[in-house]
Image (cartoon, rainbow, N blue to C red):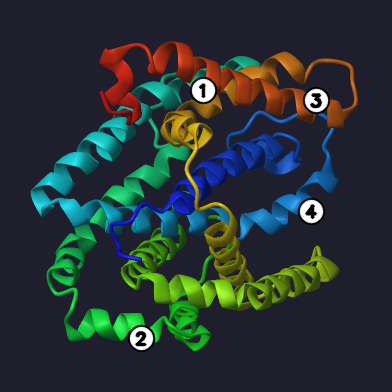
Amino acid sequence: MPVGDRRYDIDWLRVIAIGLLLLYHTAIGFQFWGVMIGFIVTNKSWEGLWIPMAMLNVWRIPLLFFVSGMGVCFSIQNRNWQQLLKERISRILVPFVFGVFVIVPIHMYLRQFYYQQPMKYYADSAHLWFLGNIFVYILIFMPVFFYLKKNKNGKIVTSIKKWLSTPLGLLPVITAFIMEVILVNPVTYELYAMTWHGFFLGLIAFFFGFCFVLSGAVFWNMLLKWRWMFLTIAALLYTWRLLQMPAKVPEIRLVLESNFWIFSVFAFGYKYLNHPGKALRYLSEAAYPIYIIHMIFLFLGSILIFPLNMQVQWKFVLVLVFTFTGCLCFYEFVIRRVRLIRPLFGVRK
């Protein structure tokens, strides 16, 4: 499998990761502490909802960073560094800046309206912090990545392929993440947004995502062969963590759990999702702008639905449906059809 071959499973995982992000952010609105991180929250919490969310929380953001590094590995096959930089400026930096100064202030206004606070303009990266990080990683690693591309038959690339051909080759990957938590010592492992922990964790995942694709079929076949072992270890570590709640779990164990979930996701995605389709073509383009705008529709749904007199479980379902439907409709009838604004949401003209 040459590096340049289209990998539909990675496209699917990007779409699924954005979907999980919407699910996760909706769930925060049903936790009492959500208000402390800038969310609109319902008066009655649904604490049991956080059990599956706690499983997602240790790997959903690292997964996106891995996938982003993989995307760069595919992109540079037919581009020089100037073309890559130009593309990433248009696809990442422009939507990031537009989002900071236009999109984020809108959902900030909605939050202020709900809590009857003074209406003030806030330009902030908020949920778009991820895009800022990705653009910085590209600038940092671009010389390294193009060197590896130029010397794809050299000793370094050959060593990477050999090293990642067995499960033991994943030990340096895991070790890098362990060293990150030891050196950075995050207050909370799952707090990625706008922290040095999130920055360095993303940096590591981005780099190894590139290496995973660079390694070719030998790496992916290894994941496929050992997929049940990865899944079993991840499930056991999660179960162990559940049994200890609400006690704080050591960060090193969270690193192990996170990585084994991610290896499992890649392995099963490679086996079952590597096929094209109309749904993938549509959702692959829609996922990015939906990520940019989803907080607006999440907060709109919260404002409309939270005051209703119904069970908290139904409120969750309604807010989730409202958010997904609102985002898809706005993408389909506005972003997709208005040519001038497409670049502001990272969609090609």
Q: Residues within 10 Å of mark 2 (few under 14, many from 20)?
A: some
Q: State the residue at coordinates (83%, 39%).
A: 46
- Residue kind at label 4, given as amino acid type: Ile
Q: State the residue at coordinates (44%, 27%).
A: 104
The correct choice, above or below, for 216 with respect to 321 in the image is below
Disc on the earlier residue, 2 or 1: 1
- Mark 4 — residue? 51
Judged from the image, the secondary structure of the residue bearing numbered disc 2 is helix
- Mark 1 — residue? 107
The correct choice, above or below, for 253 with respect to 329 in the image is below
| Contact (Cβ within 8 Å) of mark 4 with mark 3 | no
- Quadrant location, the C terminus: top left
Disc on the earlier residue, 4 or 2: 4
The reply, left or right, for residue 195 in relation to residue 261 is left
- Mark 2 — residue? 162
- Residue kind at label 3, given as amino acid type: Lys
- Mark 3 — residue? 315
Q: Nearer the viewer, residue 34 or 334?
A: 334
Q: Position of residue 83 (x, y in %)?
A: 12, 45
| Contact (Cβ within 8 Å) of mark 2 with mark 3 | no
Judged from the image, the secondary structure of the residue bearing numbered disc 4 is helix
Q: Nearer the viewer, mark 1 or mark 3?
A: 3
